[in-house]
Amino acid sequence: MNYLQFRNRFFDLGCFSVHQVYAWQADFEKSNLTRWAKQNLLIKLRNGYYSFPEYLKQPDFVFFVSNRIYRPSYISLHTALAFYGMIPEAVVQITAVSTLKKATFENAFGLFSYQQIASHLLFGYDLFGYDAKPFSNGGTLLFAQPEKALLDLLYLYPFYNTQQELEELRLDEDFLQQDFNVELFNKQASQFHSKALSKRAELLLKTYDL
């Protein structure tokens, strides 16, 4: 197998799975992928998933990787809150939620963490709380809306149940006053069907005078 032929076929995908390779050539030798990864011609993302080192220079590509190597999933929690400027901290890992079990993967692009949520919180209300954002390679990124990212955080980390804990999130006041949709936040909170979450959501609104 000629690497240049392989590259021409899969480079524009950004990242790809071995299943896509076998769909292209059923007799493809998987050892080629191992060899090319050792030669730094490919980057192994997790078992069965690969990308190309040129994409390391593309800052937002980590979001695309997150979406592709563990599906269904969308970017949420701390990564989404930092992306919107809602929290001041720099995020050291890419956080996402999925209907699959909790998982963590580490590769040359970074550390990817996935928290598990119930299927109705991902699929029950069409694209419930997340958008399909256009990506530079012609694909899309599944990314939580600000309100849903915050609700996912309250839902998955129930220790945010006091005013002090919520204050320590240090949510950006300007964003909350100008861009945060309280009505949407309350609507989405009710769709979780969780009394405990609703109480934490109400306390958050009270804590930040929303």
Image (cartoon, rainbow, N blue to C red):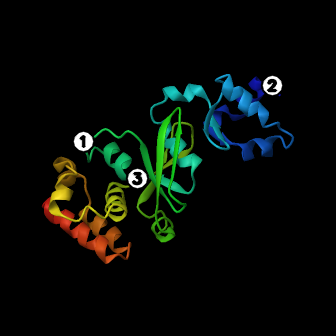
Q: Give the residue type at disc 3.
A: Ser
How packed mark 3 is, by other alpha carbons closer than 10 Å (few <14, some 14-19, many 20 or more), is many
160 vs 175, nearest the viewer: 160
Residue depicted at 17% across the width and 48% down the height: 174
33 vs 201, nearest the viewer: 33
How packed mark 2 is, by other alpha carbons closer than 10 Å (few <14, some 14-19, many 20 or more), is few
Mark found first going from the N terminus, 3 or 2 = 2
**Could you give the CA–CA distance between mark 2 and mark 1, rounded to whole angstroms?**
47 Å
How packed mark 1 is, by other alpha carbons closer than 10 Å (few <14, some 14-19, many 20 or more), is few
Residue denoted by label 1? 88
Marking on residue 46: none
Q: Residue furthest right?
A: 27
Residue denoted by label 2? 2
For residue 16, above or below residue 56 = below
Q: Residue furthest left?
A: 209
Pointer 3 with pointer 2, Cβ within 8 A = no
In the rendered image, residue 179, in percent from the top left (x then y), is placed at 25, 52
